Image: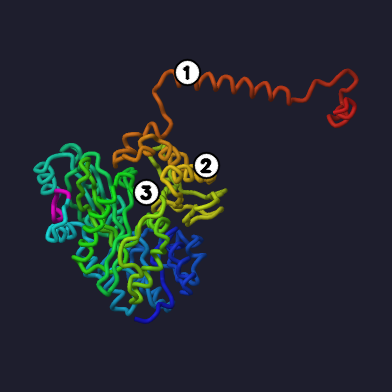
C-alpha cells in the first residue's frame, strides 16, 4: 500500500489537534473540517487546509458523511482519520471511504459491524467464549418489550446505546417507575450522539471497576495488547480520570484480561487500534462490556507508560506496515489523565460555554496538555464540553498523583467555569489514593468532592474565620483611607500634604 500523503481529520477539538501534530511529525499534510460554530477553533488553525461542512449541530455538519467526503475530494486527501465520536464507529462511512478510494484509518467495516454495534458485539463474544455481563443480545423495538425484559432480569439495570459509547445514551434504572422516562431519554441522547437510537439492556453490577485493554492489530494477522487503563472515576457514565497501570490488577489478571482482549479482536478480524472494555467485580471476575473500534480519549496514559505514539501506529498500520512489537510491553512507571471540562460541578455539572478570557496551562517535567482551546477562544454550546486532557507520568502512582495535583494547582482558566478544583479533590480523596475505587465513587462522594459538609463544628469554624477575615479587611481598609486634613491644610492637594509630612 502506498504511503499516505494527506489526511483529513473528521473531528474537532483536542483530538483533531492531537492527530494533526503526529501527522506533521510524519511529514503528512492535514485537512480540517469545521462547522459554523468552529470557524475560529484551534484545529482549524492547526491544519494546512480547512473546509466548512455545515451548521453548528453535529447532525448537520460533522455527522454528514457526504460533506466530509466532499471535503476530502476537494482537498485531495487520500486518507481520513475519524478521531473518536462522530463517524469513528460508523461502518457505512468506512464503506463510503472505500468506494471513494480514500483510506479509512481504523478497522475494516466488517470488524466495525461485528463490534461497533454493542448488541452484535455481545453475540460475537458469547460465540467466542468471552464472558459477558448478563443482558439482552438485541436492541428493543418498543419500550414495552424493554420494560418487560428489565422486570424479568431484575433491577437495577443499565440502558445502553447500541450504536456508540462515551457515556452517551446510557441510563441506570433502579425502579420500574423510572423506566419509561429513562428509556426515552436514553434513546433521544443516543440519536443525537450517534444518529442511531437503538438501546439494549444489561444487568447492573454492584461496585464494579471499569478496566479496559488497549489492543492493536495489523493487516498481517498480528494482534497484541498494550496493557490496561483503569477508568472507574466516572460521573454520568462519562470517564473523568483515567490511569495506568490499574491499581487493582495483578500481573496475572492483566495477562489473563489481555489474552481475552486479543482473542476478542482476532475473532472479528480486527485491524488498527481498539479498546476492549471490561467490568471487574468485587471477586475480581471480569466480564466483556463492549469494544470501542477507535482510538480512545484516554490513550495518552498508555503512550506515557509504553513510550509509543498510537496515532503514528494507526497511520502506519493503515499504510500496510506490520506492528513493531510482537507482545505487550511491560508498563514503565505510572500515568494519570484528568479531563478538564467547561462545566460547573456545583451546579449539577451544567456546561459553561463562553469566551476564555485567560488561560495558563501548567508546565514542568513529564506533563502533557492535549487541548483544543486558547485565550480568547469561545467554547460553543453544541458539543461535548471537554476542553483539555491533562496527563502526567511518574515512576510511581503516589508520585503521579502529586504531580497531577501540582499541575492542577497551576491550571488557570477564566471567563468560563471549569472543573479544575473538582479534579483536584478527586485526586486528594482517600478512596482514590487508596486505589480501590469503583464506578460509584464519584456519585457516592459528590458532596465531599464539592467541599460541602454537614459537620456543625466545621461550619462554626468557617463562620468564625469569615468574621475574623472581615474584621482584618475593614481595619486594613480604614488605615488606607486619606487622613483628615490638619488645620490650615484645607484645599491643599493630597500630594502637597504628603510632601509636608515627609511621606
- Whether the residues at callouts 2 and 1 have beta carbons within 8 Å, the answer is no
Earlier residue among tags 2 and 1 = 2
Q: Element under label 3?
A: strand
Q: Element under label 1?
A: helix
The span from disc 2 to disc 3 (Cα, nearest Å) is 19 Å
Instruction: Residue 139: say if magenta.
Output: yes
Residue 260's spot in the image, x, y percent?
21, 58
Instruction: Residue 393: say if magenta.
Output: no
The span from disc 3 to disc 1 (Cα, nearest Å) is 37 Å
Q: Is residue 437 visible?
A: yes
Q: Residue at x 26, y 48 (%)?
A: 170
Residue 32's spot in the image, x, y percent?
45, 68
Residue that mark 2 sits on:
409
Residue that mark 1 sits on:
460
Q: Element under label 2?
A: helix
Residue that mark 3 sits on:
242
The span from disc 2 to disc 1 (Cα, nearest Å) is 27 Å
Amino acid at each position: 500500500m502506498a504511503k499516505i500523503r494527506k489526511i483529513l481529520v473528521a473531528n474537532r477539538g483536542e483530538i483533531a489537534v492531537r492527530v494533526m501534530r503526529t501527522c506533521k511529525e510524519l511529514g503528512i499534510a492535514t485537512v480540517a473540517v469545521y462547522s459554523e460554530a468552529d470557524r475560529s477553533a484551534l484545529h482549524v488553525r492547526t491544519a494546512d487546509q480547512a473546509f466548512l461542512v455545515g451548521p453548528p449541530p453535529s447532525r448537520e455538519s460533522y455527522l454528514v458523511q457526504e460533506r466530509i467526503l466532499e471535503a476530502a475530494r476537494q482537498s485531495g486527501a487520500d486518507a481520513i482519520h475519524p478521531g473518536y465520536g462522530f463517524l469513528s464507529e460508523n461502518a457505512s462511512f468506512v464503506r463510503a471511504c472505500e468506494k471513494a478510494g480514500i483510506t479509512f484509518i481504523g478497522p475494516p467495516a466488517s470488524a466495525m459491524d461485528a463490534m461497533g454495534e454493542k448488541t452484535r458485539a455481545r453475540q460475537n463474544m458469547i460465540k467466542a467464549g468471552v464472558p459477558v455481563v448478563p443482558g439482552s443480545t438485541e436492541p428493543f423495538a418498543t419500550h414495552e418489550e424493554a420494560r418487560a425484559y428489565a422486570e424479568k432480569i431484575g433491577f437495577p439495570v443499565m440502558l445502553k446505546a447500541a450504536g456508540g459509547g462515551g457515556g452517551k445514551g446510557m441510563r441506570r434504572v433502579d425502579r420500574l417507575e423510572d423506566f419509561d422516562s429513562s428509556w426515552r431519554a436514553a434513546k433521544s441522547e443516543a440519536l443525537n450522539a450517534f444518529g442511531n437510537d437503538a438501546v439494549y439492556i444489561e444487568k447492573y453490577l454492584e461496585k464494579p471497576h471499569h478496566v479496559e485493554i488497549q489492543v492493536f492489530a495489523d493487516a498481517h494477522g498480528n494482534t497484541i495488547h498494550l496493557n490496561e487503563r483503569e477508568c472507574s472515576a466516572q460521573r454520568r457514565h462519562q470517564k473523568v480520570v483515567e490511569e495506568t497501570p490499574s491499581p487493582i490488577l495483578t500481573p496475572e489478571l492483566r495477562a489473563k484480561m489481555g489474552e481475552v482482549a486479543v482473542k476478542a479482536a482476532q475473532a472479528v478480524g480486527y485491524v488498527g487500534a481498539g479498546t476492549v472494555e471490561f467490568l471487574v467485580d468485587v471477586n475480581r471476575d471480569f466480564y466483556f462490556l463492549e469494544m470501542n473500534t477507535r482510538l480512545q480519549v484516554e490513550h495518552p496514559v498508555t503512550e506515557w507508560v509504553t513510550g509509543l505514539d498510537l496515532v503514528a501506529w494507526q497511520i502506519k498500520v493503515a499504510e500496510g506496515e506490520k506492528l513493531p512489537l510482537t507482545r505487550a510491553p511491560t508498563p514503565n512507571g505510572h500515568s494519570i489523565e484528568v479531563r478538564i471540562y467547561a462545566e460547573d460541578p456545583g451546579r449539577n455539572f451544567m456546561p459553561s460555554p463562553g469566551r476564555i478570557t485567560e488561560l495558563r496551562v501548567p508546565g514542568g517535567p513529564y506533563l502533557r496538555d492535549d487541548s483544543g482551546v486558547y485565550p480568547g477562544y469561545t467554547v460553543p454550546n453544541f458539543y461535548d464540553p471537554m476542553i483539555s486532557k491533562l496527563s502526567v507520568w511518574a515512576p510511581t502512582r503516589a508520585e503521579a498523583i502529586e504531580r497531577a495535583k501540582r499541575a492542577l494547582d497551576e491550571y488557570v482558566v477564566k471567563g468560563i467555569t471549569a472543573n479544575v478544583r473538582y479534579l483536584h479533590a478527586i485526586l486528594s480523596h482517600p478512596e482514590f489514593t487508596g486505589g480501590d475505587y469503583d464506578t460509584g465513587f464519584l456519585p457516592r462522594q459528590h458532596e465531599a468532592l464539592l467541599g460541602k459538609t454537614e459537620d456543625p463544628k466545621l461550619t462554626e469554624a468557617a463562620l468564625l474565620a469569615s468574621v475574623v477575615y472581615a474584621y482584618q479587611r475593614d481595619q486594613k481598609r480604614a488605615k488606607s483611607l486619606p487622613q483628615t486634613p490638619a488645620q490650615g491644610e484645607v484645599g491643599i492637594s493630597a500630594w502637597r500634604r504628603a510632601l509636608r509630612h515627609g511621606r
